[in-house]
C-alpha cells in the first residue's frame, strides 16, 4: 500500500514541475507585444488542421535543421506550443542548446490560445 502513496507523490511532483516550466500569461502577452516569434512544433498536418494566428510551423523533428532559417535571430524571444506541451518542452531544450537565449514553453495549443487570448 505504501507504493500507492509514492506513486501519488511522484505524480504530484511531476505535475508541479511541469506547471513551473510554463511561461505565465502576463509574461507571454508582454513578449508577444515586443515581437516574439510564436512557433507551433506540431506536424504540418496538425498545423494545417488548426493553429494560432501568427504562428509558424517548425515541427519538432525538424528543429535542428530548420531553426536557423525560420528563427534567424537567436536573441529574439521564442514562444513554443504543441498539442500537449511535451513536444514544445523538448523543442525548448533543443533551441536553448542551439544558442537561443529567450525560449519559453506555452504548453498545449489550448493553453496557448487561452494565454494569448
Image: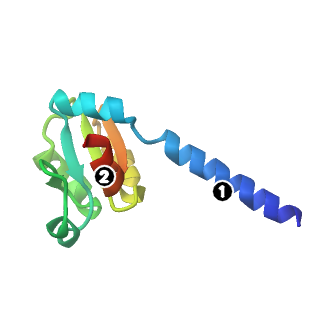
Which residue is labeled 1 in the image? 11
Which residue appears at 39% of the width and 37% of the height?
23
Left or right side of 40 for 12: right
Please say if 66 is above or below 35: below
Extreme residue toward the bottom, this view: 45
Please say if 96 is above or below 12: above
Local packing at callout 2 (Cα closer than 10 Å; few below 14, some 14-19, many 20+) is many
Please say if 58 is above or below 46: above
Rendering quarter of residue 109: bottom left
Name the foreground residue: 57 vs 69.
57
Name the foreground residue: 55 vs 29.
29
Horizontal and vertical percent position of residue 7: 74, 61
Viewport quadrant of the C terminus: top left
Which residue appears at 35% of the width and 45% of the height?
106
Q: Secondary structure at mark 1?
A: helix
Q: Earlier in the sequence, mark 1 or mark 2?
A: 1
**Is disc 1 in contact with disc 2, using a CB cutoff of under 8 Å?**
no
Which residue is labeled 2 in the image? 81
For marks 1 and 2, give the CA distance.
22 Å
Viewport quadrant of the N terminus: bottom right
Amino acid at each position: 500500500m505504501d507504493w500507492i502513496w509514492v506513486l501519488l507523490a511522484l505524480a504530484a511532483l511531476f505535475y508541479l514541475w511541469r506547471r513551473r516550466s510554463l511561461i505565465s500569461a502576463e509574461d507571454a502577452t508582454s513578449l508577444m507585444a515586443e515581437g516574439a516569434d510564436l512557433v507551433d512544433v506540431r506536424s504540418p498536418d496538425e498545423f494545417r488542421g488548426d493553429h494560432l494566428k501568427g504562428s509558424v510551423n517548425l515541427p519538432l523533428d525538424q528543429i535542428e535543421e530548420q531553426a536557423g532559417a525560420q528563427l534567424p535571430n537567436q536573441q529574439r524571444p521564442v514562444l513554443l506550443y504543441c498539442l500537449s506541451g511535451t513536444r514544445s518542452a523538448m523543442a525548448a531544450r533543443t533551441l536553448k542548446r542551439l544558442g537561443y537565449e529567450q525560449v519559453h514553453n506555452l504548453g498545449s495549443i489550448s493553453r496557448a490560445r487561452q494565454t494569448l487570448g
